[in-house]
Structure formats: C-alpha cells, structure tokens
Image: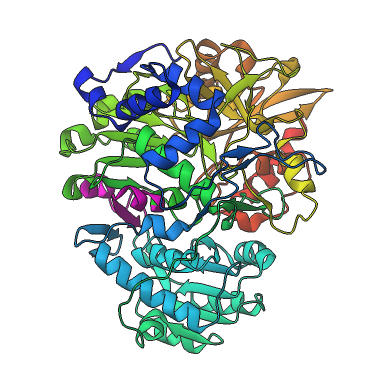
Amino acid sequence: MGNKLLWTPSQEGIEKTNLADFMKAASGVADREISDYDNLHNWSINDRPAFWSLIWDYCNVIGDKGERLLINDNLMPNNKDVPSAQFFPDSKLNFAENLLRKKSDDPAFVFWGEDKVKRGMSFNELHALTSKIQQHLISLGIKEGDRIACMLPNIPEAIAAMLAATSLGAIWSSCSPDFGEKGVLDRFGQIEPSLLFAVDGYYYNGKEIDVADKTIAIAKGLPSVKNYVVIDYLGGAENLAKNLPNAQSLEAAIAPYSDGEISFKRLPFSHPLYIAFSSGTTGVPKCIVHSAGGTLLQHMKEHRLHADIKDGDRVFYFTTLGWMMWNWLASALASNATIMLYDGSPFYPDGNIIFDYAEKERFTYFGTSAKFIDSVRKAELNPIKTHSLESIRTISSTGSPLSPEGFDFVYDGIKSDVHLASISGGTDIISCFVLGAPILPVYSGEIQAPALGMAVDVWDDDGNPIRAEKGELVCTKPFPSMPIGFWNDAKNDKYFSAYFDRFDNIWCHGDFAEITEHNGMIIHGRSDATLNPGGVRIGTAEIYNQVEQMDEVVEALCIGQDWDDDVRVVLFVRLGNGVTLDDDLIKAIKLKIRTGASPRHVPARILEVADLPRTKSGKITELAVREIIHGRGVKNKEALANPEALDIFENLRQELQN
C-alpha cells in the first residue's frame, strides 16, 4: 500500500502554484534557498514565529499584527500552572472583515439545492445582506462574547449570518436541521446562546422535511435564547416565527434596514470565534472553542498554499453545518474565491447531481468524503466518461481514510489528470495535520505531506519517533489553531485529558498513523478504535480497505471484542441487494483480508447487518457499536444520524457471547 505513483505535477504546473511563489518569499525571510517541500516544512516548524508572520503578510491578513509573534514558544496548554504558547499576543483583527475583503459583482456564492433551487449571490449582495443582519443583531443588543447559534441548511444566508455575528465579536456555533431535538439541546444547551437562527425545513432524498414542531420543542429547552430569526426554505418561515418567542422571519427582521457599511470590531488574536462540537457518541459532546486568529491563519494557509486557491476559483466541499468542513469552506471567501454550496442528498435521484453541478458551474476545487468516492465507485458510476470536468484542478477527500482503491478510482473513474489531496485533521483543531501539496506527487493510499507549520510526527507507546511503522499521530510543538479550551471547563481538566494525558507537553490526536518512505502519511483509523488481538495493534481502516473492495460488501464496521482475556476481531458487513452471508462468502472475506492485510487482521466472527450507525457528518461510529456489544450502552444516541441502527447490535450482543 502506498507505493503506486498515480500523479506527478508538471514543472509548468508547479511554477504556477501559490506554494512555489511562497517558497521564494520564504527563502528571503530565511536568508537561504528553500526549493522543495521538505525544506520548507522543516523551516516552518523550526522557525515558527518567522513562518507564521510570513503567512500573515503573504495572505494579506487585515488587522494589526503587533510586535510580538510568539511567546512561551514550546509550551503546550497541558499544565494549569504554566502559561502556554500564544501566537501574535499583541495583534487585533476581525475574522469577518477578512472574509468580506472583496467588494464586486463577482459571485460570492453559487447555491444548488436538492429541491432544484439554483441561485447565486454576489460579493456586493453578501455585503448588503451581512450589513442588514448586523444592524438587526445590534438592535437586539448582541455584543462581544455572546453566543449565536444556528440550525440551518447549507445555504448562503447561513454564512451571511455567521459573518454578521462574528463582525461584532459574538461567538458562532452551528448544527444542521437534521439533528434531533436532544442532539441540538445537548450542544446548544451547554453554551447558552442568546439568539438562534432557525429554518422552517429542508429537502433530503426527494422528501420535504418540516422541522417546525422540532424547533418549537427545542425553543422550550433553551431558556437562554431571547430572540429567533427564521430563514425561509419551505415557505413556512412566517408561520414558524409566530410560534416562537420574540421571533421574526429573516425577511421581516432585516426589512427596516438599508445597505450600509459593516462595522468590524477588531479583537485579540485569541478571541473566541467558533464553538464546535465533538461527535458525542460516547457522552455529551465536548464544546471546543476556537480562536478567530488561529482559525483564520490556518485556513488561509491551507487554502492558499495546500489547496492552491486563487482569486476567482470556484471552491466546493460537500458538507453540512454540523461538520467543521463548513467552517473551512466559508473561509475560502478570504481568498476571494466563489463558494459552491449544495444542500440535500448527494445521490438523489441517481448519484450524478454533484458531478452535474461540478460540470455546469465549473468547479476548480472539488471537496468530498472518502465515503462518497467509495459509494460512487460501488454504484459503478463513471463520471470520467459522463461528465466534462476539465475545470477541476484538485479533488479533496476527508472524513475517513481514503482507501488505495478510492485513490485509484479517482484517477480511473473521475479524472485522470488531477491533484488528489486526501486530508486529515479534525474538529479539535478546525484544520489539518496532514494534507495535500500541489508540488508533490500523489501515491496510492497516502496523504501527501505534513501541514506547513505543524510539527507532526508518529510515536510508539514509549514516545519514540518511528517511521514505516504504525503509531500515535502527535504534534510536538504548539500551533495557532489549538483550541482556546472547552466551554464550561474552567480548570481545563477535560481539555488537558483530551490531548495531553498520553505524552507530556505533546498533542496526541488519537489517530493511528504511519509515515511512509515518501514522507507522506497513512491514517489507519482512530487509535481509540484500534484493535489489539494478541497484543498486536491493528487499524480498522486496514480491514475496510480489503473488505470494501469486494462487490458483495457495501460497507463494513469492525470492533475489538474483549474475549478470553484477549481481544478478538468482529466484523459487521452490510451487503448488496440479493447477497447473502453464506459460508462461501465468509471464507472469501477472510481470504481477502488474510492475503491483502495479514492473518492477524482476519476476524474471528463475521456478521451481516442491515445498517451501520453513523454520525451526522456521515462517519461510521465504531465506538458506539463497541459499547453496545460490551453491554455498556450508548450515552448519547441523539448524536447519531440513524440511532435506530444500534438496535441491530443490541440484538446481536447475546449471539456474540458465544
């Protein structure tokens, strides 16, 4: 795995990248020639003040940088009694001001909805809408530090509302309207928002889904919310507003105001910007607080240098407001890009809608999930033949590890000449640890490179760096987008234990990873879901990579079950229509895993299931199944998109005692 060369950038292509241009600027700052990625990365982590200062300048961050660039240089926030590293401690900036830098009639957004709605919004129109929403927020007394929550589809108004809130220094938090009542309350109830943006409903998989009753029930559980703004999607905003306290439709709320200049409150680099939430499948979600400066700098770095986004590019990522990729996508406005928004099922009615969108609107950056790519492959769609995708320079994948077969399919089935950037990071850092680099080759199954400015490594259990072996993904030096902390965690106990319990003064991310001979990385899955049969650590992704190559298997989920003073591997498979898990198929699955991975990867038990539990962002949740099988139950079923799937595993628990 990982040795097959799939794509090499042309020299002409390399020279046109922002990254090549940035290396010239870095050479001037470092006072030595920096001509390749490894040298640039080494400089970026060994002279982080100079690197991040250059990022500020190169990306034209709007604000006052201040004199000091980094204090308490190498101290992670894992000791209550010692101040941790702070980037740009004297700076002042406003996140929204940086995203609203462009004023023109060029499109800021193109939106397609599953309900066939297609519309756009120019940068000037975005400014006007943001200004009106800001004026409404000011009239309600919204101020710096207030929490503003939203439960909205992936529509332009959601980003405008976020910009209006953050322009005032308010803290933004979001989820998608498919969250259940308890899931919303488990999140927003912890942060006590003063205002909630809601929607009357949305479309998914050919169905109109009204959320009015759910929203009214949620309102009863959020006493902190003093005002509501309802955005119309199904035509019922006015009616819903009548049933919520102090509520108006967005149209009515902004009607009294005319277009005007937006007032941007510049605040410290570390001022809270977003509260994001962990998946919450094993307890109440953690409320992760992200800074304005850290988020902005990381996203601009990733967009400009790793994604090679330029003025006028058309950037798409399939996401909802319940996933940090929505926050990542919104930041592309700071690079003067047009954001391509979609809301609905990516497979309704026939699996082609996203490729139709990419062709019609000429995406230059196409972001999606590994699961989407695998589903397209298994559906035997062939966009490389059915769609004209010549405008796309980069295809990006995240959400879970992209298998080697997924890598191959992108080049065989979607586009043969494209930069495929598998990326990995998380909600915890609202950015990436490892991701694409447009000046480097792409190898099957490998993420290309460690992120610039991020001292990424892989360590064994004793804290020793290892190569070509599986271990813990760590970051050994502070970085700007480390969370400020967790909400309602005054002593930082939960924050410290989440990332710093394993290794002193080292961020331990919880991914099971391997650095390759190309200095790329393979993610083998979450380390807290790592299997340990016979004391040998196995990543679940290694098993999925084999099983999901089989036409009979739609998808799979693997856990380690405590058994006979050891751990045995149990594999659950969802099969294609008309396929039965008989003895022959079980033998074929085991042979595939044995030959493609190793004998230690072969499951002790293989069981067929009708469905697999997944989070709202589409990730299969191994931990929830492991808890069920061990009789511990799942504390927060509302975090799942399909909690009913857990009943399947509850019914199998007794069978797995034999």
How far from the left and from the top, in percent, is residue 555? 48, 35
Q: Give the quadrant of residue 586.
A: top right
Q: Residue at position x 30%, y 78% from top?
A: 259
How far from the left and from the top, in percent, is residue 485? 68, 50
Name the residue furthest front: 67
Q: Quadrant of the C terminus?
A: top right
Q: Residue 618, relative to residue 156: is it above or below?
A: above
Residue 198 falls left or right of residue 468: left
Name the residue nearer the viewer: 269 or 604: 269
Residue 354 is at least partly visible in this image: yes
Q: Which residues are magenta?
A: 330-357
Q: Residue 78, relative to residue 267: is it above or below?
A: above
Name the residue nearer the viewer: 26 or 501: 26
How far from the left and from the top, in percent, is residue 591? 52, 14
Q: Give the quadrant of residue 371.
A: top left
Q: Residue at position x 67%, y 79% from top?
A: 223
Is residue 355 rendered magenta in the image? yes
Name the residue nearer the viewer: 565 or 274: 274
Q: Residue at position x 67%, y 33% from top?
A: 507
Q: Residue 221, relative to residue 514: is it above or below?
A: below
Q: Residue at position x 49%, y 84% from top?
A: 139
Is residue 117 rendered magenta in the image? no
Residue 152 is at least partly visible in this image: no
Q: Give the quadrant of residue 541.
A: top right
Q: Residue 260, relative to residue 277: is it above or below?
A: below
Marks counted in the figure total 0
